[in-house]
Image (tube, helix red, strand yellow):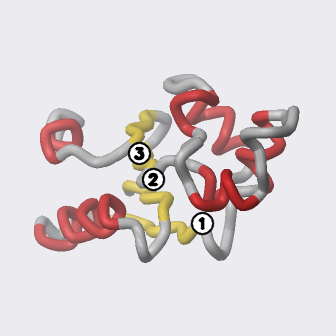
Amino acid sequence: MFQVFGTKKCKETQRAIRFFKERRIQYQFIDLTIKGLSYGELKNILEYYSYDDIINVESREYKVNNFQYIQHDKEDIALNYPLILHTPIIRINRKVKLGFKNDDILNWGL
């Protein structure tokens, strides 16, 4: 089953969810405004992407917390400030995709 990490307001996340619904593909939506990533989920994502890839420095949350001006631990902000992450993060088994592209999902063997 696919897992889609994102927010209800994110347009890309909405596109991913619509894609799965239209094709009747089972998925689980994890709303980052309610529940952040676990340490294990973060480590799995980091097997494919770096912190620089997953942290959105243009996000409102990043700017509100002034992370552009202070030294910070990237692991700490990825775990404790999930609204800073690029979304959606799509995961099946141990494979991870950042962002949503129809072709990427179809190439996973659907």
Secondary element at tag 1: loop
Ranked by sequence position, the earlier of labels 2 and 3 is 2
Instruction: Name, please, the residue furthest toward the front.
Output: 69
Quadrant in the rendering for residue 107:
top left
Question: Where is residue 32 drawn, in percent x and y?
Answer: 60, 66
Question: Where is residue 97 drawn, in percent x and y?
Answer: 38, 38
Q: Amino acid at mark 3?
A: Ile
Please identify the quadrant where the C terminus is shown: top left
Q: CA distance from mark 3 to mark 1?
A: 17 Å
For residue 67, above or below residue 23: above
Question: Where is residue 25 drawn, in percent x and y?
Answer: 23, 64
Instruction: Identify the residue shown where x is 67% and y is 52%.
Output: 62
Q: Amino acid at mark 2?
A: Thr
Instruction: Identify the residue shown where x is 44% and y is 57%.
Output: 3
For the residue pair 73 and 13, the one nearer the viewer reads as: 73
Q: CA distance from mark 2 to mark 3?
A: 15 Å
Query: Closer to the observer: label 2 or label 3?
Result: 2
Quadrant in the rendering for residue 39:
top right
Please identify the quadrant where the N terminus is shown: bottom left
Q: Is residue 23 left or right of residue 52?
A: left
For label 2, the residue is 87
Give neighbour class at mark 2: few <14, some 14-19, many 20+ (Cα, 10 Å). many
For the residue pair 20 and 7, the one nearer the viewer reads as: 7
Secondary element at tag 3: strand
For label 1, the residue is 32
For the residue pair 82 and 66, the one nearer the viewer reads as: 66
Q: Amino acid at mark 1?
A: Leu
Q: Is residue 87 left or right of residue 104?
A: right
Quadrant in the rendering for residue 81:
bottom right
Whether pointer 1 and pointer 2 mark residues with C-beta atoms closer than 8 Å, the reply is: yes
- Residue 92 disc label: 3
